[in-house]
Image: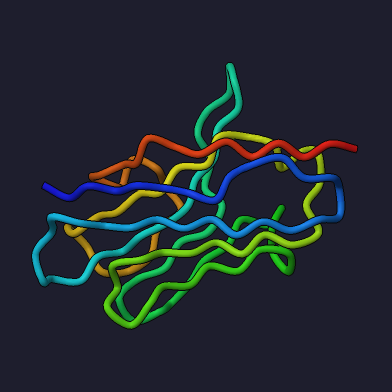
């Protein structure tokens, strides 16, 4: 059973930056694909950016060029650098991981484990 704990959310003005972190514990040594997803009230959870054990990445079109996903060398800490934030980026951001397949996927249903989420608020 993998546990994921996010941190780094907060409030920022439009144009600002935040860096989210997600620490993974309790898992085995097999590589994971991991990702960041976000959700606002009464909307479906959507992908932001994902990465696999080989550092292959995929991004949602809405964040391409503004957000950067990365992970540390041990593959136990996931990051999301968010620059040029906009009010529409406001959401609860979730870290997710999956061990069943290797290639990154933007589909939330493809991920086994989820963190509790961290809130990001961007004011105009």
In the image, residue 71 sits, relative to residue 11, either above or below, namely below
Depth order, front residue of 28/106: 28
From the top left corner, tell me how far across and down residue 34 is, in percent: 35, 60
> Where in the figure is residue 77, as x and y percent of width and height?
36, 66
Residue at 25 percent of width and 55 percent of height: 98
Which color scheme is applied? rainbow
- Is residue 16 rendered to the left or right of residue 99? right
Please report the residue visible at 66 percent of the width from the left and 63 percent of the height from the top.
67
Residue 67 falls left or right of residue 103: right
Name the residue rendered at 84%, 36% in the picture: 123
Rendering coords of residue 5 (x, y %): 34, 47
Outermost residue to the right: 124
Quarter that holds the C terminus: top right
- In this orientation, which residue lies closer to the viewer: 1 or 64? 1
Q: Is residue 24 above or below residue 55?
A: above
Q: Residue at x 55, y 51 (%)?
A: 8
In the rendered image, residue 55, in percent from the top left (x then y), is placed at 40, 79
Compare residues 94 and 77 and report the one nearer the observer: 77
**Which is nearer the eye, 7 or 83?**
7
Q: Is residue 55 left or right of residue 97?
A: right
């Amino acid at each position: 059973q993998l546990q994921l704990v996010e941190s780094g959310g907060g409030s920022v003005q439009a144009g600002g930056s935040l860096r989210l972190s997600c620490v993974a514990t309790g898992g085995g040594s097999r590589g994971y694909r991991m990702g960041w997803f976000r959700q606002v009230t009464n909307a479906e959870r959507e992908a932001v950016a994902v990465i696999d054990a080989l550092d292959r990445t995929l991004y949602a079109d809405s964040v391409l060029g503004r957000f950067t996903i990365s992970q540390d060398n041990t593959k136990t800490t996931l990051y999301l650098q968010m620059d040029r934030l906009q009010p529409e980026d406001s959401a609860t951001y979730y870290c997710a991981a999956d061990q069943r397949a290797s290639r990154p996927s933007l589909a939330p249903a493809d991920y086994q484990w989820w963190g509790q989420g961290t809130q990001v608020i961007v004011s105009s």
